[in-house]
Image: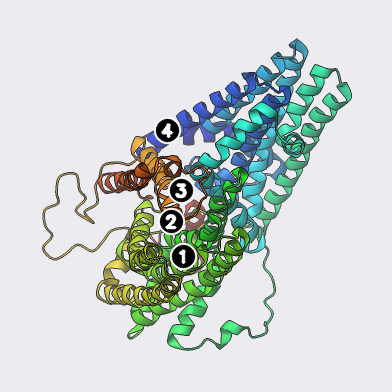
Amino acid sequence: MVGDLIRLKLTLLRRSLSGQRAAQLVLGALVGLLAAVGTIWIAGITAPVASVSGDLLGAALAVWFFGWAFGPILFGSGGTELRPDQLSLFPIRPRVLTVGLVSAGAVGVGPIVTLVALVALVVHGAGSGVVPALVAVPGLLLTLVLVVLVSKVIVTGRGQVVRSQLGAALSGLFTGVLMAAGGTVWAIAPALGNAFTSGFPAGFSVTVHALPSGWALTAVDAAGRGDWALVMAGLGGLLVADLLLVAALASLLGRQLTSGRAQGRRTRRVTPSKPGPLDRWTGRVPGVAAKELRTWFRDVTRTNFLYFALFYGLLQTVTPLVIGADVLLPWTGVIVAVWVAAVSANMYASDGTALWLTMVTPRGERADVRGRQLAWLVIVAPIALVLTVVFTAVSGLSWAWPWALALTASVLGAGAGAVVLVAVLFPVPMTDPRQRGSGAWDNRIDFVQVLAVLGLMALSTLPTFGTLWIASAVDSSALSWLAVLVGVATGALYTWGLGGLAHRRLAGGGAALLQLMRSGHRIATARPAAPASGQSPADGRPQASGAGWPTVALVACFVLCWIPLLPQGVVPMILKLVGSDVRSWFLALWMPDHLQWPVIIGMMVLGLGILATGFVIAAKYDIRPPSRRGGTPGLGAQVRSDLEEQQRRMRSGV
């Protein structure tokens, strides 16, 4: 049976090597190989401090470990992974299934690339002699088994955790760290440079070696010193961890296969609960808001996005503290509010075909839009305001209070309007919630929606920003605080105006939107115009595949544009306007006075140019997630449907 599962995995891989999926697989393999080569290079570098090479290698191995742990939850398996629910109808014992799934999981691009990366242990050991290099061989094999098992256990167990809130939080933390690292490399690089010459802190070294990903490295270093007790502890710990993970995975699979549910959760007796605060929200708009609030805390995809925006905003402003730059702290609430709006703009499509309930409710479109806006503000406004107040106070920058409060109010109002408007203008059809798996990326982020929300919110801040600019130019404290009222007023205006556009659009085009949710295609007009070359007649979007370099270029534009735009453009501009003497890492503020404004403007133009390039790529290439019909079930659901149909026929005597 184990051999059959391995052959089945090879068949899945072979049949997936076509079209866009093949391009994504090749691209992922190239990126992974580059990362693996980088890991091997880290193992071979010579640093002024002897411990630096080992600490860097330990950190790199930790990245590979956490990538395996949370990567499948974040990015999916590409359709080539064997899922236990697909095999639930076969008489396979959990232990046999565990060995088969782990063996099949070790076949593919990811394990091969990881194996190449783990060769860094041999390279690192060879620097100390032949014996440490030989010790590295079983260490890398046990580590490879460890990461595959950890991935299987987390993916399987995550579906059996009530609400999967922990998985959503960890997923949001992981993606937030990855994206924030790209946007704050300017702050991390100097700290790494200092550590390279003087060594990492003792706590950092202990942490990377104490993680399971560092046990093999600990054994290799111990072999170089002749500490064989520690060698046996490192390798033995890996072996014991692998065996424990095998037992845990077998237990989880046993529960999943015998529970009768794909998610593996046992049925529980439903007991009446005490009425909560949301039960009193019974009006048209409050009722929709209460439903949305429950969705925000119960739908793992929305929870994941909320955690992502929170962690991303915090890391964007807190990370520069490693070089003593605290000038970004007051903008934490603004950044978090902006990103919650950017990643939650697919709220109508995430509800799937449940849109028909709104369509059959008389004048239900307006109440639905306003209720969603109210719920979004109830969720985001307290978080953004608390972060703004706390971090502005911590920064000690008294001049930043009117700036931070005014811009926070402005982006909150604009976000509440932009999320619903973009949700009805640029929806990406998703599978109905009842037919989704437990992956946090069943409702994936769409770059078109993100760019549209960011554009609307940037335009919405112009009146507030202009008022603050004038107040700084005339050095008027009263006018600065007046900008807070301007921010509140413009935020309320954008909430009302953009929400009005959204519910009118929903009322006029709700049928087309529902059709898009059901089939993945828009309703064709009665007299469709001839599509332009390279465009789809269904929705007019380009047919050119975005797999490969367009996706890489778009992600690069999306991550890198903020470096010249915000920390090198907007922030030094604000510092110059308020007369602050902070220079930090801001290039323009180190230039002669007559060159500071040209450099600031040039940086902002560069950032906007990179962002505009992303818009062009998004318009020319189909970089959106593949559309999935709202009623399209997965394999497990199809099998269950076929069995139910067969049982109905047998009962009816057909």
- Circle 4 residue: 27
Which residue corresponds to the image point at 46% horizontal and 28% vertical from the top-left?
Answer: 30
Secondary structure type for disc 1: helix
Q: Position of residue 34 (x, y in %)?
A: 50, 27
Label 4 vs 2, first from the N-terminus = 4
Q: CA distance from mark 4 to mark 3?
A: 31 Å
Mark 3 or mark 2, whichever is nearer to me: 2
Mark 4 or mark 2, whichever is nearer to me: 2
Report if the CB atoms under discs 4 and 2 are less than 8 Å apart.
no
Q: CA distance from mark 3 to mark 2?
A: 10 Å
Amino acid type of the residue tagged 1 in the rendering: Trp
Amino acid type of the residue tagged 3 in the rendering: Pro
Label 3 vs 1, first from the N-terminus = 1
Residue 439, placed above or below residue 378 = above
Which residue corresponds to the image point at 40% horizontal and 79% vertical from the top-left?
Answer: 370
Could you tell me which quadrant the N terminus lies in?
top right
Report if the CB atoms under discs 1 and 2 are less than 8 Å apart.
yes
Q: Position of residue 285 (x, y in %)?
A: 43, 84
Q: CA distance from mark 3 to mark 1?
A: 16 Å
| Res. 549 in view | yes
Say which mark, if any, is on residue 574.
Answer: 2
Number of numbered discs: 4
Secondary structure type for disc 4: helix
Could you tell me which quadrant the C terminus lies in?
bottom left
- Circle 3 residue: 567
Q: CA distance from mark 4 to mark 2?
A: 40 Å
